[in-house]
Amino acid sequence: MESAPKKGVLRALVIVAASIFSTEIILMILFEEMHNLPLMTENLLDGLFLTLLVSPILYFQLFRPLQDNIAELEKTRDLLKNQRDILEEEVSRRTAELSEQNRQQEMLMHDLKGANEELKNFAYVVSHDLKAPLRAIGSLTQWIAEDYADKFDEEGREHLRLLVGRTRRMDALIDGILQYSRVGRVHEELVRVDLNLLLHEIIDSLGPHEAISVEVETSLPELRVEKTRIQQVFQNLISNAMKYIDKPQGEVRIGCIAEKDDWKFYVRDNGPGIEERHFERIFHLFQTLAPRDRVESTGVGLALVRKIVEMHGGKVWLESAVGTGSTFYFTLPLVGSIDREGVEVNEA
């Protein structure tokens, strides 16, 4: 069956041909005399021949291309309609997805707000309801150890020593939990900090044993940061390195390399090293590798380091092997740095 556009073109062709033929007849009747009828008939036949000759030309040169264009326009119209329907469906789907995501995000923000409030309340309870009785227990234990140590035998004195150590560790654990809870919740003013001076203050405050050498082996930059937080990072990493050194002469080295987008800091030691399977675990809260009665550790220090570094837009990781020591790395963005003069530059 022929399409509607094709029928329309054929109808137009017939009309044009009939118009040409009818026009010639009318003109001959009006302008030719009846006695010239033979001539008129001849002209009529010529007009008919001309009509038959011109009609195909008109069809193929004018109406056929027009027919094709109409067909293409119909195809384009159908295609655009399909695309519009698809687009409307996609817009509706994405709108529904975004609405659901916004709803879930609002629920998450509500949950986070509640969690932060609970953490704040927990910190208050810890600082007021646990610290006070713990201080009393610590003072009493210390008093017994000082005034009545000679009343105990060797086993009793060992138990008393453990009691004093565990009381101190509990106090340090509570302090660590409070510090961890404040990171990201309590913000300090950003100040200019010369890390060279800060590191010397930290090393002096830690008071390393004479058998442990702690040195800053590269120049360090001056940054605009929260001073207390950055101090906690370096202090925890350095004290952690000093704590686990098992060599007669311990070494801890601190340095910095300026990379393309970050400062890369490191704290390297010649301690016992760490198995690779523990690389991730030691950055989790309350995780330690050595028995806590042998090495005083709360398991908060490295978790606090990771939280502070990530809060500042950096990352922290470890490279180590058993027997060869460990190197802890962390990065801080170059944005906000004030000075990099004298710092080693990594062009890679």
Image (tube, rainbow, N blue to C red):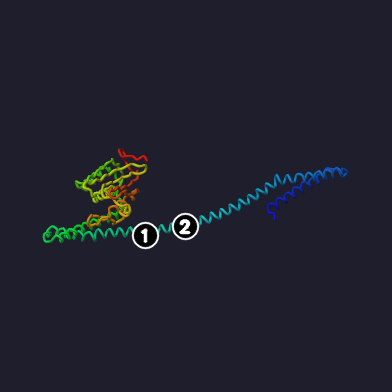
Residue at which label 2 appears: 97
Which amino acid, mark 1?
Answer: Asp
- Total number of numbered discs in the rendering: 2
Residue displayed at 51% across by 55% down: 90
Q: Position of residue 252 (x, y in %)?
A: 25, 46
Mark 2 Cα within 10 Å, few/some/many (few <14, many 20+)?
A: few
SS state under label 1? helix
Using the image as rendered, state which of residue 347 and residue 141 is in the foreground: 347
SS state under label 2? helix
Q: Residue furthest front?
A: 323
Q: Is residue 28 above or below residue 94?
A: above
Q: Position of residue 150 (x, y in %)?
A: 11, 59
Of mark 1 and mark 2, the one earlier in the sequence is 2
Q: Is residue 118 visible?
A: yes
Q: Which mark is residue 66?
A: none
Left or right of residue 99: residue 218: left
Q: Residue furthest top?
A: 342
Q: Position of residue 178 (x, y in %)?
A: 27, 56
Q: Which mark is residue 111?
A: 1
Q: CA distance from mark 1 to mark 2?
A: 21 Å
Which amino acid, mark 2?
Answer: Glu
Using the image as rendered, state which of residue 18 and residue 196 is in the foreground: 196
Left or right of residue 9: residue 312: left
